[in-house]
Image (cartoon, rainbow, N blue to C red):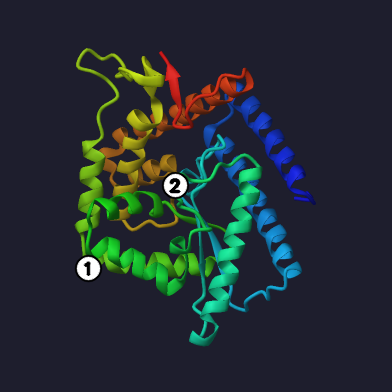
Amino acid sequence: MHAQTIEELSEIRDRAEELVFSYLEQEVSVLFVTATMTEINDALIHKAIEMSQSRLEEEGYRRPRQPFCWMSLGSEGRGEQLLRTDQDNAIIYVDPPEEELEDVAAYYLKLGEYTTEILKACGFAHCPGDIMASNPEWNQPLSGWKKHFSSWIRKPDPKSVLNASIFLDFRGSYGDMELIENLNAHLYAEMDKEHGLVNFLAQNALDSPPPLSFFKSFIVERGGDHKDEFDIKGRAMMPLSQAARVLILSHQEPDITHTVDRFEKLAELEPQNEDVYHEAAMAYELMIRYRALNGFRNHNSGRFIHPGGLIKI
């Protein structure tokens, strides 16, 4: 990506969105479209980090010798983000010697702050829950991340389940991917010892309300700004993505992040449930397409909808 300014970066993302919209209208494979947009988003992140590093050098910060990795979380971590939703990201870096820790931590926190500001200027809003690399809690050395994951796994509670539902869908978008591999190895080693978190996540998936009523009609919002609208993300997509996450975790397949790919892999691993998994994969593909088209059309016509993907029925 040859953009030299934040404005140029934003324009590139705008053009990419137009391309994706045309692909979806032409019914190009959703897996191809999401893979294309993931490549574009990763290139944008790469450039935003480079710009931030240049700014830090101008301000007199010395780049640490310890490498880092930018972690994408949530829908972007799964490689499913088509609409410009809130940011969910983090930074992981190699543990420095004790005497260097303060300087290294300060550098990477500044890097997180500057990069998330650039992404905001490109249309990716700040996370309301502050799940971003600009938050020191989510900008940690490898040892800090191992402590986070161990805590969630060993002492699962509602907050742990909430964090895990975001952070277990993580992948490296830029930097040293060995850090991601190391963190995954730690995650599965811990899960081999403790199964409580997986059980909590499974229950959470089962507790998600069904999208259809007893009479097979969509369950819509009964009041508020979205009265008579259907929450395609909360009622239809999240239950499927949660189920796919729990099941793929139980099979210890960390390299498969996209929900559709997870269901297809599960069909291989559990041939007795093959038909169900294939149907779930097809349903999720359809919902990705429908949600994105609805979002693009409303944005282009001036009608803004909640990024959760609410649609009229």
The kind of secondary structure element at disc 1 is: helix
Q: Which residue is mark 1?
A: 193
**Image coords of residue 306 (percent x, y):** 47, 28
Query: What is the quadrant of residue 112 in the picture?
Result: bottom right
Q: Residue at x 55, y 36 (%)?
A: 82
Label 1 amino acid? Lys
Q: Amino acid at mark 2?
A: Gly
Q: Which mark, by number, is residue 17? A: none
User: Which mark is first along the chain, 1 or 2?
Assistant: 2
Quadrant of the snapshot with the C terminus: top left
Q: Position of residue 310 (x, y in %)?
A: 43, 24
Indicate whether 150 appears above or below 301: below
Q: Find out whether the residues at labels 2 and 1 contact each other: C-beta distance under 8 Å.
A: no
Q: Is residue 184 above or below residue 218?
A: below
* Circle 2 Cα neighbour tier, 10 Å, few/some/many (<14 / 14–19 / ≥20): many
Relative to residue 45, is residue 29 drawn left or right?
left
Dot 2: what SS? helix
Left or right relative to 68: residue 306: left
Nearer to us in this view, 304 or 290: 304
Q: Position of residue 78 (x, y in %)?
A: 46, 47
